[in-house]
Amino acid sequence: MMRNRALLTLWGGEFSARIGESMFQIALLWYLLEVTGSSVATGVVSMISYLPAILVGLWSGVIVDRRPYRQVLLQANAARLLLVLALPLLFAWRGLPVWGVAGLAFLISSAAAFFGPARDALIPRLAARGELLAANSLVQSAWQFSLLIGPFLAAAALPFMPTIDLFFLVAGAFALSLGVLLGLPRTPAAGAHAQAGPDVTRVVAAPEFGGAFWADFSEGLGYLWRERRVFWIWVVTVANNFFLMGPVIVGMPFYVKTHLGGDGSDFAIVEGTYAGGMIVSTWLIARFGARWNPTRMLCWGLIYDGLTYVPLLWVSTVPGTVAVILVHSLGIPTITISRLTALHRLVEGRMQGRVFAYFHLAVMGMTALSIGTVGIVLAWLPVNHLFWIIGLAAAGCGVFGLLHPTLRRA
């Protein structure tokens, strides 16, 4: 993998973009809290930033499959760069109301709905079929390292600048990503790729826009339904992310503050622990994971992921929570890497943009719904009890996958 220049270029672009995303979330939440002082307004805008996965995700894959993946990545990053720059510039010009922040956050997330599927669909064009697990591990590590570096950069910068100016650094990260991704080799659109998969070279014509767009849209949904192994992996992903993502995003800061009596520094330590465990696990999977069936790895990873949240019911200290999260985070790459590798092997090359868009919808769309649900549930359920309940529910998704006859054959 270290000799694959194109894949390393994709890693560099992904790493820079992920740092931008990480700092953007910190800047967005802090700015809203400073301006409104309202947790409700902050939560609503945060939820709005996830809505494009639902509203855009269903059809973004059609566009991704119609364009060269490199072009989609560049255009998505250029859009995010300009939209992020608009935040501090509009603030300096005439101020920036909350509805304006919400609108720009929505548009920025809409661009991300194209970036993610194009990135995932490009990987099989840059790596041989036998190297997909290692290639996916490498690209996933960009996200994990960004979880360490992005918050550190934001924390280091905030004492020396207003929160609104942090968006200039976010724009800089997207600009760097754009520059790096310009070094990617040019590849044809998915319609000019093989009909039967990434290793086949027969060329077919890409469809034109117009009525054919909706034909492609319908074809993508039909493909997801007909390919039962892919469909059931999608169903498991939907259920698992609904159970877990709200507690992770909303529940964890609430857990640290109300259950542990901790402060913002304690929360930052807990969040940073996720990255440490994931980096170690990603290296282990890249080194030893080629012999494992990716679908079974996914199911066992879901079980481990859920069960390792259960001890938060009894933990009452920050060091104890850090230990639990470290153990928990070791299992996260077994889900993300194995799912991506399984899809690369199961999905036709010309359909991958659409299928990855549906999985982006499953992850980010369910995150929006889960955040809203958890906010209601925590009004009457102690947060430590929330974690053992969702832990068992999430583990149940993995058990379902292991027992389902279609997934057992995947």
Image (tube, rainbow, N blue to C red):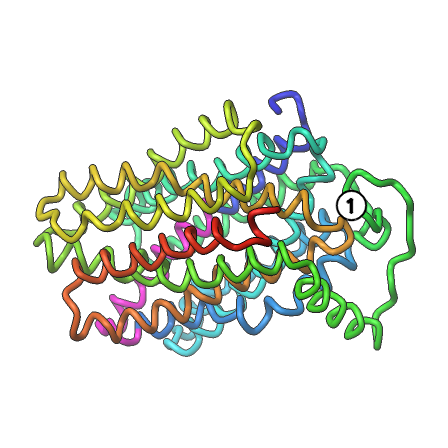
Q: In the rendering, at what x and y percent does residue 127 appear?
A: 69, 32
Residue 340 in sight from this viewpoint:
yes
Above-or-below relation of 178 to 400: above
Q: In the rendering, at what x and y percent does residue 361 appear?
A: 54, 64
Q: Secondary structure under badge 1? A: loop
Say which residue label 1 marks: 197
- Looking at the image, which is closer to me, 176 or 125? 125
Q: Residue at x 26, y 49 (%)?
A: 309
Q: In the rendering, at what x and y percent does residue 143 appear?
A: 46, 42
Amino acid type, callout 1: Gly
Q: Residue at x 83, y 48 (%)?
A: 193
The picture quadrant where one finds residue 46 is bottom left
Is 46 magenta? The answer is: no
Above-or-below relation of 255 to 334: below
The picture quadrant where one finds residue 249 is bottom left
198 left or right of 153 in image: right
Specify the principal SS of the magenta part: helix
Total number of numbered labels? 1
Residue 112 in sight from this viewpoint:
no
Q: Residue at x 79, y 52 (%)?
A: 190
Above-or-below relation of 343 to 149: below
Q: Residue at x 22, y 56 (%)?
A: 388
125 left or right of 95 in image: right
Is 20 magenta? The answer is: yes
Q: Give the magenta-colored segment's residue range.
A: 19-41
Q: In the rendering, at what x and y percent does residue 131 appear?
A: 65, 29
400 left or right of 26 in image: right
- Looking at the image, which is closer to me, 188 or 9? 188
